[in-house]
Image (spheres, coloured by chain):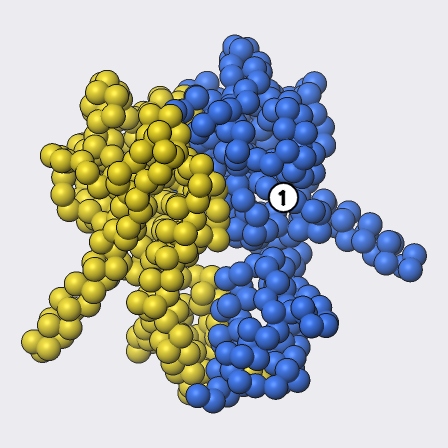
Chain colours: A blue, B yellow
C-alpha cells in the first residue's frame, strides 16, 4: 500500500503527539510507509515547522543508525497565558468557598481537558530538566500528576496518607499539617519509586506547605532529588513556608468567608517560563 | 499567511486528537486557514480515511450552519488486542503478589502511557453510550478514570472513603468490604455529580465487588444511571458477586502466595466490543 504525503503526515502527527517525549526510530515510519528516509525526513520537517509555528511543541531529530524523532510538548507563551487565563476564570466562579476558607476544587481536578492543558503547561516549564517521575499526594493531586506525567512520559508515584494493604512494603514520614497543626503520616510504597530518582512534585493547593515539606522529607528517604515543586493554586498571605522554591499557576488571597469572596491573581509560572528561556538563551550564546 | 494542505493536515490532526469527542465548528478551520469550506472538507476527508484505516478513531461531520467535525477515539480490534496483550505482559511480571493474595498494581496505575491506551480501549467500548461522567473510587481508580474521561471528554467524579473538609456537603453510603467483611463508608460531594447523570463506573480491581456495589448504591442516591462498569482486572473465582454486568480487561485466578504464582487470562472486553458491533450492525440493517 502506497501512502501520499498528506496521509503520512496525518498518521505521523497522531503518532508523535500520542507518544510525547518518546524517541520514535525513523525506520518505524520508513517501514510503515515503505518510503525513502529522505521523504520521511521531509515529512518531519513540515511537521516540525507547524508544531513550532503553532506553539504546540518541538520536534527533535537525532541522526545515525539509531536515529529518530522525539516530540516534546512545549506550548507557546500565548497558549500558556490562555491556559492560565481559562483556569483563572474557572477558579473565580461563585460558590467555591467552603467553611473554613477552603476552596472547592474537585470539579477542576475532575476536568480532564483543563488538566491536560495544564499538564502541557507544566511539562513546558520543567521539560528541559531530567525527570524520572512525577510525585504527588493522594487524593486531589493525582489527576494533575497524571496529566503532567503523560506529557513528560514518566511514571507517577502517589504518596498516600493511609497505609493500604495493596502497596507492599512502604517508607513513611510524619509531618505537621499546616492548617490543622496535627501530626500526620504519609507513606510511599518502596517499589513505586527507584532510589536516587529525580522527581517533580505537583499538588493542587499550597497553603502552609506542611504536606509538601513532608513529601520533600520522604523524598530524602528515597535519596531522590526534587527537581521542582509546582502547584495549581497557592494561598498568598502565608509566611514562613518551609520551602520557597516552587511555581504556581494561580494565587488566592483575601479569602472572606462572610462575603463569599476572594482574590485570584496569576502565579509565577509564566515568569518561570520567561526566566528559563533567558537562561537557555544566555547559555546557547556562550557556545 | 497561507497554509498548504500538508500544513493544514498536521494542525487539524493535532487539534482534533487533542479535543476528542468535541464538536469543532468547520468555521474554526475556515477562519484559521482563510481557506474555502470545500478545501477544509477535503482535508477532513483525508484525515477521516487515515484515522479509520489505521484504527485510530472515527471522524463525524455534521452539515449546516452550526456544522463541524468531531473526532471519536475508536480503536481497531487489532489495537485493542495489542493493548490487552501488553497489559497482560505487564501484569504477569514477577513479584507482583503481596501478602494476603493482593496484587501490586501501583506501577500500572502510575504508567500514563498504558493508562492512556487503556483509556482509548474503554472509550471504544462505551463511546456509543451517552455518558455524562466517569465515576471511580479513590485512590487507585483515579488514574484510570482520568484516562477514560479524557477520551470521552466528560468530567470525573471521585468517591472517597474519608470525608475531607474540602469537598463541601456530601452524600454517603455504607458498604460491606468483600475482602475484610467490615462495614465501611464512601462519600461523594453533592456538587461533584449532577442529579440524574448517566455514569460509567471504572476501577482497578474487582474482587468480591463490595466496593462497586457501594458505588451503585451511592449512584441511586444521586438518581444517576449506571451505564456500565469496567475494571482493569477481576479475580476470577469469586461467586455471588452482587452484580454481574461488567467488563474487565484481564482475569486473574489460582493465586498461589506460597509459589508466588497466578494465572492471567483475557477478560471479556474484546468480546464486548465484538457484541456491540453485531448489535450496531443489525440495527443499521433494519433501516
Q: Is residue B241 visible?
A: yes
Q: Nearer the viewer, residue B258 or A220?
A: B258
Q: Residue furthest front?
A: B259
Looking at the image, how many numbered discs can be counted on the residues?
A: 1
Residue A147 appears at what percent x and percent y? 51, 47
Q: Which residue is mark 1?
A: A132
Q: Is residue B157 visible?
A: no
Q: Judge by depth and name the residue closer to the eye, B264 or A225.
A: B264
Q: Position of residue A242 (x, y in %)?
A: 68, 21
Image quarter (top left, top right, bottom left or bottom right) of the C terminus of chain A: bottom right
In the image, residue A27 sits, relative to residue B175, either above or below, namely below
Location of residue B162 by image quarter: top left
Residue A177 on image: x %, y %: 55, 16
Q: Residue placed at 67% from the left, 39% from the top?
A: A198
Q: Secondary structure at mark 1?
A: loop
Q: Residue furthest top?
A: A182
Q: Nearer the viewer, residue B41 or B114?
A: B114
- The chain holding disc 1 is A
**Compared to A17, does B68 lie above or below?**
below
Q: Residue at x 63, y 59 (%)?
A: A72
Which residue occupies 22% across, 54% down? B268
In this view, B236 is above or below A42: above
Q: Position of residue B169 (x, y in %)?
A: 32, 25
- Mark 1 surroundings within 10 Å by alpha-carbon count, few (fewer than 14), some (14 through 19), many (20 or more): many
**B240 is higher (above) or lower (below) than A80:** above
| Quadrant where the N terminus of chain A is found in the figure | bottom left
Q: In which image quadrant can residue B286 be found?
A: bottom left
Amino acid at each position: 500500500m502506497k501512502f501520499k504525503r498528506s496521509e503520512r503526515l496525518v498518521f505521523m502527527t497522531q503518532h508523535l503527539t500520542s507518544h510525547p517525549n518518546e524517541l520514535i526510530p525513523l525506520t518505524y515510519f520508513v517501514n510503515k510507509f515503505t518510503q525513502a528516509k529522505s521523504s520521511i525526513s521531509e515529512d518531519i520537517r513540515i511537521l516540525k515547522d507547524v508544531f513550532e509555528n503553532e506553539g504546540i511543541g518541538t520536534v527533535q531529530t537525532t541522526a545515525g543508525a539509531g536515529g529518530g524523532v522525539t516530540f516534546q510538548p512545549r506550548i507557546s507563551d500565548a497558549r500558556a497565558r490562555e491556559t492560565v487565563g481559562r483556569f483563572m476564570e474557572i477558579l473565580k466562579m461563585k460558590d467555591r468557598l467552603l467553611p473554613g476558607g477552603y476552596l472547592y476544587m474537585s470539579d477542576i481536578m475532575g476536568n480532564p481537558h483543563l488538566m491536560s492543558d495544564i499538564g502541557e503547561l507544566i511539562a513546558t516549564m520543567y521539560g528541559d530538566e531530567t525527570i524520572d517521575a512525577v510525585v504527588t499526594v493522594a487524593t486531589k493531586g493525582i489527576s494533575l500528576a497524571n496529566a503532567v506525567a503523560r506529557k513528560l512520559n514518566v511514571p507517577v508515584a502517589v504518596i498516600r496518607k493511609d497505609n493500604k494493604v495493596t502497596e507492599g512494603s512502604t517508607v513513611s514520614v510524619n509531618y505537621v499539617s499546616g492548617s490543622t497543626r496535627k501530626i500526620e503520616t504519609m507513606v510511599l510504597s518502596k517499589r513505586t519509586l527507584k532510589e536516587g530518582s529525580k522527581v517533580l512534585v505537583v499538588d493542587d493547593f499550597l497553603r502552609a506547605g506542611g504536606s509538601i515539606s513532608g513529601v520533600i522529607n520522604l523524598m530524602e528517604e528515597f535519596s531522590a532529588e526534587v527537581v521542582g515543586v509546582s502547584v495549581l493554586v497557592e494561598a498568598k498571605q502565608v509566611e514562613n513556608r518551609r520551602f520557597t522554591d516552587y511555581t504556581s499557576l494561580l494565587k488566592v488571597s483575601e479569602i472572606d468567608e462572610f462575603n463569599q469572596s476572594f482574590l485570584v491573581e496569576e502565579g509565577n509560572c509564566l515568569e518561570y517560563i520567561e526566566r528559563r528561556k533567558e537562561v537557555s538563551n544566555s547559555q546557547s550564546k556562550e557556545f
